[in-house]
Image: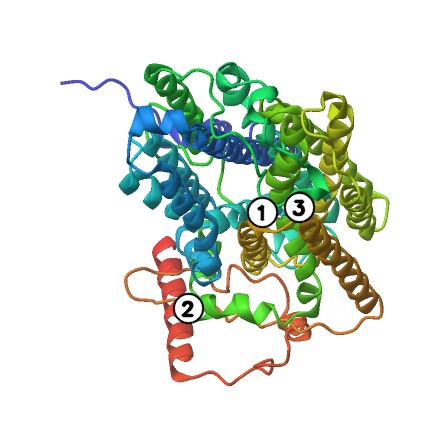
Amino acid sequence: MDAGPRLPRETADGPGSEAQLDDFVGAHPDYDEEEEERKYFRRKRLGVLKNVVAASLGGTLTYGVYLGLLQMQMILHYDETYREVKYSNMGLQDIDSKMLMGINVTPIVALLYTPILIRFFGTKWTMFLAVGIYALFVSTNYWERYYTLVPSAVAIGIAIVPLWASMGNYITRMAQKYYEYVNYKEEHVQEQHRAPRGAYNSYIIVFQTIFYGCFHLSFVCAQMPMVFFLNKFLYELNHTLFNVKSCGTLSKGMLPGFNTTVLQGLPRSINLLVVESVLMAVAFLSMLMVTTPCVCRFHQQVLILCGSAYRPTEEIDLRSIGWGNIFQLPFKHMRDYRLRHLFPFFIYSGFEVLFVCTGFSLNYGVCAIGLENLAYILMAYGFSASACSSLALCMLCLPRHTVLLAGAIVHAILLIGLFCWAPMPQHLAEAPLLYVVAVLWGLGSALNKTGLSILLGMLYEDKERQDFIFTIYHWWQALAIFVVYLWAGLPMKAKLSIMLLTLLVSVLSYGWMEHKVACHIQHRMPKIPKPRHKVRGYRYLEAENSDETGSESEREHESDGEGSQEQPRGPQQHQDCAYKQAVGEEDEDRLG
């Protein structure tokens, strides 16, 4: 069978064929590599901004749901008629006291397990796990029993420090990644070396400001169940404050003489279920905002909201330093004088946020203008703190101590004023002054919280240290909250005196720290061990440590002298290096 005329070989393989091949596999004439690179890193920067907003909103919704549900639960369980009619002799007050104990006591041991959780699960998945525990706490309120409420409260206590430590670490890492995507042409970024000192500062300031601007809105979100549901069941102040004789600085404990019947009508069970279902849906939404698209295909558009904080090889390096070292490093970091001098500020940060939610709002606010106005006092505080968080942007052009000292001055003036002020019970004329104090306290809280997180991000730029630093910060906060839980029965003057003394010590200690830093006094920083990778089971193809951020001489300069001298390689290290070299040569031969 005739196959037809054949083309000469020189024609088939001639210049025309080569031209067609070049057109097919060659570069497109309109392709601009630099422009495509610029678009790629612009998408990366937008992704980082999306991560920050999603994490901030997720934290806001989580904490808002938790506070709102706990507040509504405490008010309902406080009412004597509600307890007798709904739950008879179940002992709700005893259950509530054990719940509060579980929430406030359990974080004492959080320093022992938080770094291990963060390194084992990763920063983002620790956030997801902790938010899931908060959602579990919401779900247990569908069936209020001792064996549901108390264990979930203990779980909340376990999750408090890991959640906020991983959240602070995540926001700081996003600021560093944004810097890398902005300066992607710089040599130290391309080589994954240490950035110049202070290069991340402006991005840390902006991102932490965004986070706390959203986070303080959680105090507003927490009042929605009160405003839209519970307030219509409350008695007016003439009934609830009938036996209250003293308020403010003259009071002792938690509002003595407050009426044990605060509900003029009992809410229907179906209405309570609707409210709890809405809170559960919001808690589930916050869980979706801190996870990835690999969970399920159906929710893919929602689950991409929060990306990873580290590259996969970085995650491997972070957990490959050994679990014993991960357990010890938080304690070793406390030897750094910069961190030790900030301990009083950490403690005061825990004091002030719980004082405004309990001491001020109850002994000053509710005592003077009634329980029906509690939600509006806390909303004024939340809106003020959220708006005033933007004042932390002043650190872009002012010295870094400005924000912390300004917040301390505001709170010192307010504490002295509260020490001298005893509003009259059932006196609605005190309302404007109460709202002014709440707004000013929100200003001080915003400067305190935002300033501390920014300062920690500036002082500790190494990505392998930040989870330890934020764990220490939030652990001291949790200890302070535990102290506030213990002092509930003290006179108000004693509480205010303790807070004022702590604030004074905080300012003096912080000023001394800044003085020592300005004098270039060497700080004692523990050396992070090098990752120890197991070569069995998988091939770690990186020729160098993928988490290396600078030269060994820089690390020696930051270390405290322990093991700073380079040690001779042992047999196992020689075997690892030989293995990596052999793997690299084998891969090159295969590719060749």
Q: Tell me which amino acid carries mark 1.
A: Gly
Callout 2 secondary element:
loop
Tell me the quarter of the picture where residue 52 sits: top right
Q: Quadrant of the N terminus?
A: top left
- The answer to whether 231 is drawn above or below residue 554 in the figure is above
Q: Mark 2 and mark 1 in contact (Cβ < 8 Å)?
A: no
Res. 352 mark: 3
Residue identified by numbered label 1 = 168
Q: Earlier in the sequence, mark 3 or mark 1?
A: 1
Res. 322 mark: 2
- The answer to whether 547 is drawn above or below residue 223 in the figure is below
Q: Residues within 10 Å of mark 2 (few under 14, many from 20)?
A: some
Q: Earlier in the sequence, mark 1 or mark 2?
A: 1
From the viewer's perspective, tell me whether residue 468 is left or right of residue 88. right
Nearer to us in this view, 180 or 393: 393
Q: Tell me which amino acid carries mark 3.
A: Glu
User: Residue 456 placed where, x, y %?
Assistant: 67, 54
Q: Tell me which amino acid carries mark 2.
A: Gly
